[in-house]
Image (tube, rainbow, N blue to C red):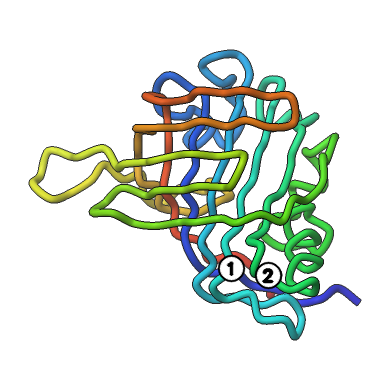
Amino acid sequence: MTESWSLKGELALSCSCTVFCPCVLSLGEHPPTESRCQTWAGIRIDDGHFDTTDLSGIKVGLMMDLPGIMSRGNWTAALFVDDNASAYAVKGLTRIFTGRVGGTTHLLSILVGQFLGVRQVPITYETQGETRIIRIEQYVDGAITPVRGKEAGQNVVIRNSEYWIGSDIIVSRADKSRFRGFGRNWNLAGRSAEIVKLDWGNST
């Protein structure tokens, strides 16, 4: 029997596209602007569970390296979990982020061809003004800021999308974006980023 799970919170993602990620509007059918996609994300879980394990307050990170069009798969991925998380939480989050318990993240079980494993390290996800500051110790140092819209105090937002991460995507830019690890050394500053409220799970 598949365990029930849910996650509510926020995701901030930085990728190698030079203009805003075409995957959002094309739903993964358009090539990345640089022909391949190098991306990392930080996730703040405000409320969540895996079976009977509480996931609230845990921070998570992802690294994904895509060789081309997102929907064609063959991704390489790695998962990072807050060092404060319990062994039960790490196990549950691993099952969620490898897509093995269905729901929102099920497509990861189809599209990820190589999973590099889980690292449990200190992770911070902070909001300073509108900028999200994400640090994954030894791996990520990032700062992501929304793109301002024409109306004062309003950001550019894509709404009512079928994008798998979330329906409303805040168009953003990486002020700082370094990823080092697993043989990769990326500097994605000045490139595409996004901020998305999460409401994930496998309940029908």
Percent position (x, y) of residue 61? 61, 50
Give the quadrant of the C terminus.
Answer: bottom right
Rendered residue at 76%/80% (across/down): 51
Percent position (x, y) of residue 131? 31, 47
* CA separation in Å, label 2 and label 1: 6 Å
Q: How many marks?
A: 2
Rendered residue at 49%/56% (across/down): 124
Q: Which label's residue is closer to the chain start, 2 or 1?
A: 1
Pointer 1 residue:
58
Depicted 181 relative to depicted 88: above or below: above
Rendered residue at 60%/32% (across/down): 28
Q: Would residue 200 be found to the left or right of residue 111 on screen? A: left
Percent position (x, y) of residue 1? 91, 77
Depicted 4 relative to depicted 23: above or below: below
**Quadrant of the rendered structure where residue 39 is?**
top right
Which of 86 and 101 lies nearest the eye of the viewer?
Answer: 86
Label for residue 85?
A: 2
